[in-house]
Image (spheres, grey):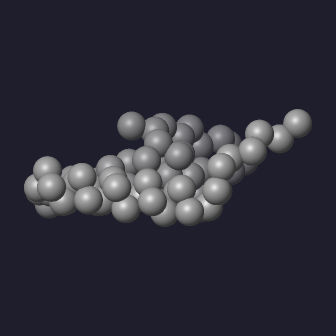
């Protein structure tokens, strides 16, 4: 669970924004949405295949130099 320490000169809104950003980076909300309902193994396979097709459509990744 992400933690945020509020500094003396920091407003609550700013600390809340930092907390939300840390939760987003940790992937808590996406994990929660993913586990909201049971997904059959066949549905999971279809979802992964369609994601792979979408990612493959963009073309190969070229590393920056």
Q: Nearer the viewer, residue 20 or 25?
A: 25
Q: At which x and y percent is residue 28?
A: 38, 48
Kindly indicate the quadrant of the structure image that contains residue 50: bottom left
Tell which residue pokes out farthest to the right in this image: 65
Asked if one can make out residue 53 in the rendered structure from this viewpoint, the answer is yes
Q: Residue at position x 68%, y 47% from top?
A: 61
Q: Quadrant of residue 16?
A: bottom right
**In this rendering, is residue 27 above or below 40?**
above
Whether residue 19 appears in this view of the structure is: no
Locate residue 13, reporting x and y percent: 59, 61
Number of numbered labels in the structure image: 0
The vertical placement of 2 against 23, above or below, is above
Q: Is residue 21 left or right of residue 11?
A: left
> Which part of the image, by quadrant, shows the N terminus?
top left
Residue found 15% across the figure and 55% down from its top: 42
Image vertical order of residue 50 relative to residue 2, above or below: below
- Give the image quarter of residue 8: top right
Q: Is residue 41 left or right of residue 32?
A: left
Q: Which residue is pictured at 75% across the width and 44% down the height? A: 62
The residue sitting at 53% across, 46% down in the picture is 25
In x, y percent, where is residue 22?
A: 53, 46
Q: Quarter holding the C terminus?
A: top right
Near-viewer residue (2 or 32): 32
Horizontally, is 1 left or right of 8 in the view? left
């Amino acid at each position: 669970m992400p933690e945020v320490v509020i500094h003396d000169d920091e407003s609550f809104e700013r600390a809340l924004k930092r907390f939300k950003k840390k939760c987003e980076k940790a992937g808590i909300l996406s994990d929660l949405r993913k586990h909201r309902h049971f997904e059959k193994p066949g549905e999971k396979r279809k979802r992964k295949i369609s994601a792979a097709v979408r990612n493959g459509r963009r073309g190969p990744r070229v590393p920056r130099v």
